[in-house]
């Protein structure tokens, strides 16, 4: 069946260091992979996405890497800041006409140590 | 733009009571979704609406009903609340690109529901 999972439930990083959050997926038919950030008491917030035909995409301080050979997704955050402390979800998604089927992972908590 | 709004933010129900969770979006999105989030379970889809006038079951629809009132509003109803429905409920919406396919979802702040 479909599944999206995370290797590390909690990640502690020193402020200023780089963070890497990993994710495994199983559905080869997924169109997009998305990373969401969820701060305490708030809804998930889109960070960055990547098409299945790409292997790397960069945003502001974030980079997503996709390795389709081993079905692995990672989120790299450069110069981690206290405001990056949150739970990060990877999600695999397949777009259908009019709606989006999304499978979310269980999340990794990122703790930034000042 | 307010994005996706949800009411109420918190709710406590007794077993057997009913209630409706409200959701509205001002982004002119066609698709809307209801998820529940439980510790260690991630987000699970309850119902979705691909467009005004249509609704479909998601992964965990039992015990819930939905109404797509108009393009902006999508409500979730618990007819007879059970303790197993204690959870955080998120509404989301997504637009449709020129190809007709819909990707990024925007989430509301959530409703924290406790059923005793």
Image: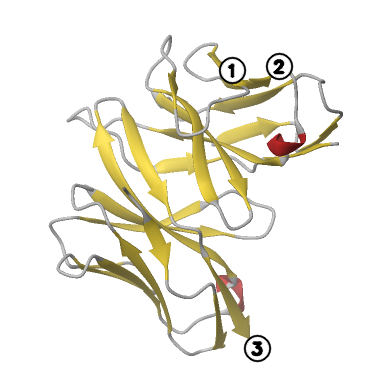
In front of the other: A108 or B96: A108
The structure residue drawn at horizontal position 48% and vertical position 31%, both measured from the top left corner, is B33
Q: Residues within 10 Å of mark 3 (few under 14, many from 20)?
A: few
Q: Which mark is residue B79?
A: 2
Residue A60 visible in image: no
Residue B46 place in picture, x, y as percent: 52, 31
The structure residue drawn at horizontal position 47% and vertical position 16%, both measured from the top left corner, is B71
Picture quarter with the C terminus of chain A: bottom right
Q: Residues within 10 Å of mark 2 (few under 14, many from 20)?
A: some
SS for dot 3:
loop
- Residue A40 figure quarter: bottom right
Please check whether the numbered discs 2 and 3 fall on a single chain. no
- Eye-nearest disc, 1 or 3: 1
Residue B87 place in picture, x, y as percent: 69, 42
Q: Chain of mark 1?
A: B
- Residue B18 figure quarter: top right
- Eye-nearest disc, 2 or 3: 2
In front of the other: B41 or A57: B41
Please check whether the numbered discs 1 and 3 fall on a single chain. no
According to the picture, the residue beneath numbered tag 3 turns out to be: A114
Residue B29 place in picture, x, y as percent: 41, 27
Residue B1 place in picture, x, y as percent: 54, 35
Q: Which mark is residue B65?
A: 1
Q: Earlier in the sequence, mark 1 or mark 2?
A: 1
């Amino acid at each position: 069946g479909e599944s999206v999972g995370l290797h590390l439930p909690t990640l502690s990083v020193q402020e200023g260091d780089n963070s890497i959050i990993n994710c495994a997926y199983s559905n080869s038919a997924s169109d997009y992979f998305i990373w969401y950030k969820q701060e305490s008491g708030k809804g998930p917030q889109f960070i960055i996405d990547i098409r299945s035909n790409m292997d790397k995409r960069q945003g502001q301080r974030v980079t997503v890497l996709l390795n389709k050979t081993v079905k692995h997704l990672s989120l790299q955050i450069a110069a981690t800041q206290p405001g990056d402390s949150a739970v990060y979800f990877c999600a695999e998604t397949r777009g259908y006409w009019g709606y989006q089927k999304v499978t979310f992972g269980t999340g990794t908590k990122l703790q930034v140590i000042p | 733009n307010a994005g996706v709004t949800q009411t109420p933010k918190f709710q406590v129900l007794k077993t057997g009571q009913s209630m409706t969770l409200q959701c509205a979006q001002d982004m002119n999105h066609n698709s809307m979704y209801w998820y529940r989030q439980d510790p260690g379970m991630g987000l699970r889809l309850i119902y979705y609406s691909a467009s005004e006038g249509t609704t479909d079951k998601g992964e965990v629809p039992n015990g819930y009903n939905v109404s797509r009132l108009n393009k902006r509003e999508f409500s979730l109803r618990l007819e007879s609340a059970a303790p197993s429905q204690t959870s955080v409920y998120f509404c989301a919406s997504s637009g449709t690109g020129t190809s007709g396919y819909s990707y990024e979802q925007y989430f509301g702040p959530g409703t924290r529901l406790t059923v005793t």
